[in-house]
Amino acid sequence: MAQATRTSPAARGGRPTRRARILKAAEAIFAHRPYDEVSVDDIADRAGVAHGLVFHYFGSKRGLYLATLENVLAAGNAQFDANIEPDPLRWLEVTLDILLDGASEEEQLFIMTVRNAGGAEVTEVLTRERQGAADRVLEKLAPTRESPLLRMAIVSWAAYANELVASWLERRSDSRAHIRALLISALNETLKAVAALHKHPGFDPNTFARGSREPS
Amino acid sequence: MAQATRTSPAARGGRPTRRARILKAAEAIFAHRPYDEVSVDDIADRAGVAHGLVFHYFGSKRGLYLATLENVLAAGNAQFDANIEPDPLRWLEVTLDILLDGASEEEQLFIMTVRNAGGAEVTEVLTRERQGAADRVLEKLAPTRESPLLRMAIVSWAAYANELVASWLERRSDSRAHIRALLISALNETLKAVAALHKHPGFDPNTFARGSREPS
């Protein structure tokens, strides 16, 4: 706190940089340490700023966590958007690689978010991200009509994916390739099951299936 | 609060009954109204007790919510345990009927819990319940060895189930039969996908599949 009062008006001109530095430090720390074991002091120390400045920018540890999460998700979503792989299965594989790479890099942040360290705001973020994942899958699937069941099933698959990846990160008891394969199967089988329940599904349930191609 | 001070020592002797009455009122209210829209006063009024007594027994609205949830889950788990259907698919259908009946009856409680109204404690409850669901499925599946991937996949299926049922309750845009069918498919396909990743799975991935029997 003493340090905060030493901040000169000139230094205050550099606010965006210091805010970014705090976020970077927070990401580095939240990525590898469970939420409850992180103190704002640790982050302030790593960012080389005063404790009070963190509160000034983010209000609370939870606020900082949420801002860090949004930052990481924005970067992840930019990667998802950059995936313009035309083949649907290959697109899905790349999408899941981005997810698995990101989750591995931000291990604790991912686990804590799925296990809901941040309360209601994090739940909202998770819900939004699952809907976003469903949007991307639906765009690739391009159904002639989007039945509520189809969207619910894909959102539920995203919940399955979050849980599976979180469990895998917690235990690392199986190969990443297995996890990816299981996620691909789960989506394919979910789509087949939805198609089987509709007379005219309006989409190809094998869109993301291996088909006749060789395993990549 | 004024009422609380009127509680006589004799009345205090009836504590278990009043506690149970508060829990019953809380269940009735949390079942149909979102957590944020419920006040402790509503519950105290319905239970016919003083506002202060609710805090005396449960500490806070969140504490009351958690106790209500544990109460409802204990009743649900007793129903799950009472399901001694020998045929695995029939057993699964009955299990899912108990889940869907319970979730429909306690609609808002179920949605709020999956959407994590209660914070970290609710997350712990959810995690425990998903592991419990996996235990029950594993008992029926009776693998010769329990691979970590198998358990993770079944726990993730439970997360899929929670999400699908919560989405369905929120929208009621599809039939309950469809939801149940999708949950059965999803478990079967998850088991098949896990089996395909193991050289010697040690379980029959078609344990819960329709097989040659007629649809029930």
Image (tube, coloured by chain):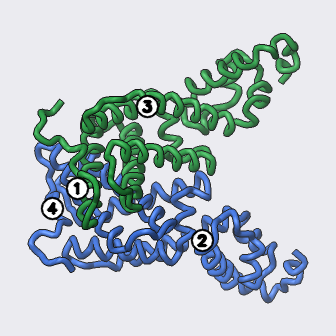
Chain colours: A blue, B green
Q: Residues within 10 Å of mark 2 (few under 14, many from 20)?
A: many
Q: Mark 3 touching mark 2, by CB under 8 A?
A: no
The image quarter containing residue B149 is bottom left
User: Can the viewer see residue A190?
Assistant: no
**Could you tell whether A7 is left or right of B85 in the image?**
right
- Classify mark 3: helix, strand or loop: helix
* Residue at screen point 56% across, 68% down: A109
Label 4 marks which chain's residue? A
Q: Residue at x 15, y 56 (%)?
A: A203
The three-letter code of the residue at mark 4 reads Asn
Instruction: Identify whether B42 is placed above or below A184.
Output: above
- Check the image and name the residue furthest to the top: B10
4 and 2 marks in contact (CB < 8 Å): no
Q: Which mark is residue A189?
A: 1
Instruction: Name the residue located 50 percent from the left edge and 34 percent from the top edge.
Output: B108
Residues at marks 4 and 2, common chain? Answer: yes
Q: Nearer the viewer, residue A70 or B141?
A: B141
Q: CA distance from mark 1 to mark 3?
A: 29 Å
Query: In which quarter of the view is residue A27 placed?
Result: bottom right
- From the top left corner, tell me how far across and down residue A129 is, in percent: 44, 61
Q: Have a look at marks 2 and 1 and say if they share a chain.
A: yes
Whether label 1 touches label 4, CB < 8 Å: no
Q: Which residue is mark 4?
A: A206
Q: Which residue is mark 2?
A: A68
